[in-house]
Every structure is written in C-alpha cells, then in structure tokens.
Amino acid sequence: MYLLCCLLCILAFKETAFLLAVSSAALTHALAKACSSGRMERCTCDESPGIQHREAWQWGVCGDNLKYSTKFLKKFLGQKRVSKDLRAQVDAHNINVGIRAVKSALKTTCKCHGVSGSCAVRTCWKQLSPFHDTGRLLKYRYDTAVRVLSVTNTATGETELAGPRRHGQSLRTTDLVYLDDSPSFCRPSRYSPGTGGRSCAKDTSCQSLCCGRGYNTAMRLTSLSCHCQVRWCCHVECQTCVREEEVYTCKTA
C-alpha cells in the first residue's frame, strides 16, 4: 500500500488528484471542528458570520471555524506563490478543490427563541455537514475529472491549466484535474499488485473491487473477547470465544 501511494504521488493520475483533494478536505474539516470543540488553543468559534441584517441574529452557539482551518492549511502547504511547474500547479489546484468542497458544505443552523414558539430571536451558528457528504462530492469530482495541459495566457504571459471545453465551458475551479491516464489497477502491474486475493464485503464492495472476476467464499475461525466483567478493583476479566464466519476474497482470474 505504501509503494502504491508513492507511485500515485509520482504520477499525476486521477487517483492522485482524488488523494490530494480528499486529504486537504479532511484536514480542513478536522481543524474547523477542533476549533469549535475547544480542542485547539490557537482558535475558537467562528467569529465572522457575515450574514445580512446581522442585528437580527444572536450568535449563541459555537460555529465551526472554517476561516482559521483554511488559512492554516494553506500556510502549512506553502501555497503563497503559484509555481510555474505544471505538476505543482495541478497539485495546488486539486488541494484547493478539496478545500472548496468543505466550504460548499458549510451551512447556517438556527434555533428559534420566543413566547409560544415565536421566532422573535434566533440563535444561529455556522456548521459543517458530515464529512461523508464531502466525500461523496469529491467522488463525483473524481468521476468527472479533466485531463489538462499547460497554456500561456497571452495577456499576462503566465502559464495556466487548460482542459478540453465541455459544452462551451472552460476549466472550472471545482474540477479535479490530472495529467496522466490511469492504468488498470485490477491486474498486477508496476503501479498495483492487483485486486486478486483482496478481502471484500459481499454486499457492498466485492462487485467493484473484484473487477467483475467474482469472489471466493470460505469459512474461518476467529477468536474474540466475550462475557466480560468488571472486577473490583479495577480491571476487566473476559473469556475467549471462538466464532465461525464467512470471508470473501477476490478471484485472481
């Protein structure tokens, strides 16, 4: 797995684009949540609601501090200057796609206060959606990723990323981009050991992970702790139980 990740980082596949985007999104999301939950000393709640008619809002709940997490991540990744190197531009673009995906999931959550359920005063805060929502969005971006090349802007003289126009649209800031066509990861190659022999879940992942080759079913015995009791004072005693379970592995051919 480590070797595969290293190879993905060397070549600019669609999978590399997704890896960078989902990593930056996860860091952005985790930092914003850590700020609002009080687990970081350098940041607190979101203090910049930026909502019209602000006087009508009473901010009484700690919002997720996306502003701090985004600023911290870009500084950590050293994105102050745009490199002329094509690969660096592609990586920076995909990192920003991940950050934007988190931003798009930021919503305002409110609770009403008042007599008899009236909404004379509302307590509102900024809240990020669960990360699996962002993951689904980035999976869609992966499926629609755009292969790009470098072009020179005649007005500024600087190099920019460009892809094929789709329905009259140019490259968007929300598109994941890549340089190299992906190989097949189903069969053994210099990029992947293939999926033959990989464990999978019968109802969720076997069909896609096994690349249509089908899977083998076998029974195995597993040991686990059971019938645990707390003893005074102060430890837990457990028995060891043996359980038979079905396991599924992808066929090699």
Image (spheres, rainbow, N blue to C red):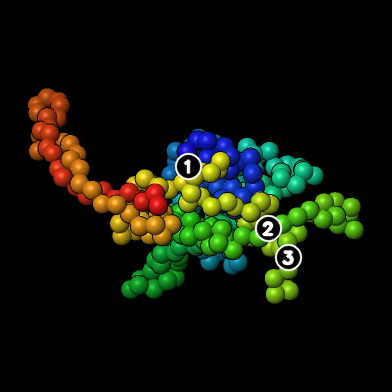
Q: Which mark is residue 147?
A: 2
Q: Residue at x 50, y 62 (%)?
A: 108
211 vs 97, left or right, is: left
Q: Nearer the viewer, residue 101 or 164?
A: 164
Q: For the residue labelled by badge 2, is the local secondary structure a helix, a strand or a loop?
A: strand
Amino acid residing under circle 2: Arg
Q: Nearer the viewer, residue 137 or 120?
A: 137
Quadrant assignment, res 49: bottom right
Measuring from the top left, give residue 170's x and y in whole percent: 73, 66
Q: Are marks 2 and 3 in contact (CB under 8 Å)?
A: yes
Determine the CA span between mark 3 and mark 1. 33 Å
Does any portion of residue 127 appear in the rendered image?
no
Measuring from the top left, give residue 51's x and y in whole percent: 58, 63
Q: Nearer the viewer, residue 227 or 223?
A: 223
Q: Are marks 3 and 1 in contact (CB under 8 Å)?
A: no
Q: Which residue is mark 1?
A: 193
Q: Which residue is mark 3?
A: 164
- Please state the total of marks drawn on the protein image: 3
Chain-order first, disc 3 or disc 1:
3
Determine the CA span between mark 2 and mark 3. 8 Å
Amino acid residing under circle 1: Pro
